[in-house]
Amino acid sequence: MRGESSELRTAQGRAGQHGASRTTGGSFASIALAAILAVQMAGCGSASDTASKVVAPAVAPLAEPAQGEWARHGFNLSEDRFSPLEQIKPDTVAGLKLAWFHDLDTSRGQEATPIMVGGKLFTTSAWSKVQAFDAASGTLLWSYDPKVPGEAGAKGCCDVVNRGVAVENGRVFVGTYDGRLVALDAQTGKEMWVVDTVDQAQNYTITGAPRLVAGKVIIGNGGAEYAVRGYVSAYDMETGKLAWRFYTVPGKAGVKDGAASDEIMAKLADATWMGKPDTVGGGGTVWDSMAYDPDLDLLYIGVGNSGPWNQNIRSPGGGDNLFVASIVALRPQTGEYVWHYQETPGDQWDYTATQHMILADLMIDGKPRKVLMQAPKNGFFYVIDRTDGKLISADGYVKQTWTTGVDMATGRPMINPEAFYNKTGKPWVSLPGLLGGHNWHPMAFNRSTGLVYFPVNEIATPYIPDDHFEWKQQAVNLGVDLAKATMPADKAIVAAVKAGLRGQIVAWDPVKRSAAWSVDLAGPWNGGMLTTASGLLFGGTAAGDLVAYDAKDGRKLWSFPAQSGIVAPPMTYAVNGKQYVSIVVGWGGVYPLLLGEMAKKSNDRPNRSRVLTFSLDGTATLPELQASAVSSAPPPRPFGSTAQIALGAQVYARTCGGCHGDGVRSGGVLPELRHSAMAGDRDAWQAVVIGGALKDNGMVGFSRDLTPDDAEAVRAYVVARANEDSKQ
């Protein structure tokens, strides 16, 4: 196939090559501030003829979880994260205590959902590392390091995170940040097979957990911000051989891929791209959510945002640009297209449809319906008929400025004309913003209450067309001017905007089409959800607490200070008749990396990455929390001309800001560049930024995009911002 590397490698002769296992015990203020403060205060695709058919799987279907186990990423194939365990109840949860914990060796964001089968707990940490524990005692049985090259960290937009493994038939499957899919022996952690799923010359990454269907491992990838071309792949569980691939956006005009998507691209998708250049990947990466209905034998994939965001670059004539921001149903044995529903046609706002999907059977208008539910970034809660992709309902769950609603006759959003910044040429401040009303953090659906629970964000984003866009190899290619949207140094402005950021947990009734209740949190970017048959709801907060709520009304029943921000979802399991609740803790992800100082509204403490597991008779305690050292050294003396500093601001915003924070203010995950000794040392700065002296730590050299003069301009800008901050 074109644009891919599918080389399969066996474990023989590969020791030390790719992995190792061990067995052990224009400023934001002038352009966007007023609009942001005002904001903060104040369609349907065609289905194929086979859509409604029930097709028997060619291979024996996967089993539902055994009693006490958490065997799938979302607990079961429906991904509802609703556990039948009832030992921990609303009237006993106050006695929940720490049973065991394990310190992880990575201090970046932790987003995994652990899997528990056969008395073993399998989870992952940043840099795609895998751990296997005795689920009752917490004893580390083995760990696996795929040895992702540090420089691969520069290929992604949103931290070197990993959302977990899949386990089946004695094998543990994990996707690595640098694009490999690995099968491990569940007993030993030894590699059984490894396959490259991406073209290593491009900026593809894998952060999502693999999903399993009968005999197949399904994996997607990320990279739409770098304008790669998205796809999803299926591999044979036993051999690692590629079974099929489905591209989500067209490739070069008139060129077939030899993929499962060829027919539907020619029949439907190609015509929705107007003048797409062959050099533009288009985005549409399948970087997270999937679900599988074994009765209908349908695999549902969530497709991500377009790339670049600005449609003038990727599709100059406009168009819906299928299948970006869509849910697509496929036959899991062949990759055959069945139906799609596009939530945000012609997406220009990073409104992905990759957020968690839940399958359920609901009574709607007195009739039983097989539905798929999703609350994607664009701010609508969708209920879709999962047999044919027809829209049942779409209702706003968060404040919106980009649209006035969804036209139920067409299934299309009614978009505010001013939101088309590519057409108006004017800045547009939108809610939801680029981080969405709800991001990747998993939802949970309680079959007893009938409610869907998920964390909600209110974070506005200014979209400003980039009038001087140039393609970069090592920077995001969005087509928007990130420098003009940078937060100024003025502390009063920073405080005012930060005060408008909001985070909540929302309990949504998909039948009544409204929120049943909500809980306000300290800020945005809170962890995913778990609910149980006993009537509990668990979720972690960015501020650093694991909390149990009454699932009926949101009353807080219990909390535990985790000593670090939580973005991952909890899960629960039982061993030897005892119920446990487990969660991977560690602050990170795109919110603190990108928003910098703004993210401190939610969490202003260092990352302490751990696996925490609780039971009603736990006796473990965490080490005493140590204060973090704060630099008091004065910033280097400012230097550089106004033009040089302005150039530095442009380069920083596009190349550096996604990791080191908006306006050179860190969100607490990576070191503060303002306080770096290298900022005052030209040679040391050049050695890192151009020469890649710290590439093993994830700081790649940027010589493919930047000249030494560009790097020096960035240093001048960093020093200028450090001095601005020191005077306030």
Image: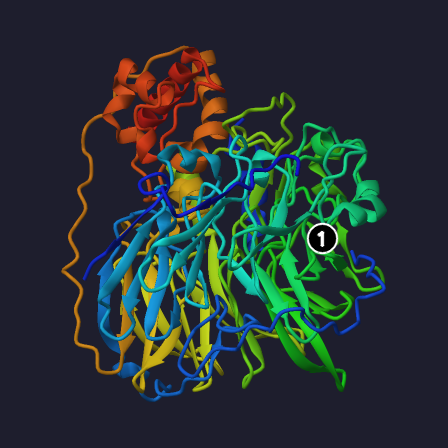
Picture coordinates of residue 80 (x, y %)? 54, 73
Tell me if mark 1 has few (under 14), some (14-19) or many (20+) residues whose alpha carbon lies within 10 angstroms of its own: some
Q: Which amino acid does label 1 sit on?
A: Thr
| Front residue of this view, candidates 7 and 524 | 7
Residue 591 drawn above or below residue 372: above
Picture coordinates of residue 452 (x, y %)? 56, 73
Residue 357 appears in which quarter of the rendering?
bottom right
Residue 419 seen by the camera: yes
Residue 554 appears in which quarter of the rendering?
bottom left
Residue 665 drawn above or below residue 326: above
Quadrant where the C terminus lies? top left
* Residue designated by label 1: 403
| Front residue of this view, candidates 727 and 303 | 303
Residue 206 drawn above or below residue 557: above
| Front residue of this view, candidates 314 and 178 | 178
Residue 526 seen by the camera: no
Q: In this view, does 235 lie to the left or right of 339?
A: left
Residue 586 drawn above or below residue 186: above
Q: Total number of numbered labels?
A: 1
Residue 384 appears in which quarter of the rendering?
bottom right
Q: What element carries label 1?
A: strand
Picture coordinates of residue 243 (x, y %)? 63, 53
| Front residue of this view, candidates 562 and 642 | 562
Quadrant where the N terminus lies? top right
Picture coordinates of residue 567 (x, y %)? 40, 58
Q: In this view, does 373 lie to the left or right of 92?
A: right
Outermost residue, front direction?
Answer: 12
Residue in the image at 18% along x and 64% along y: 622
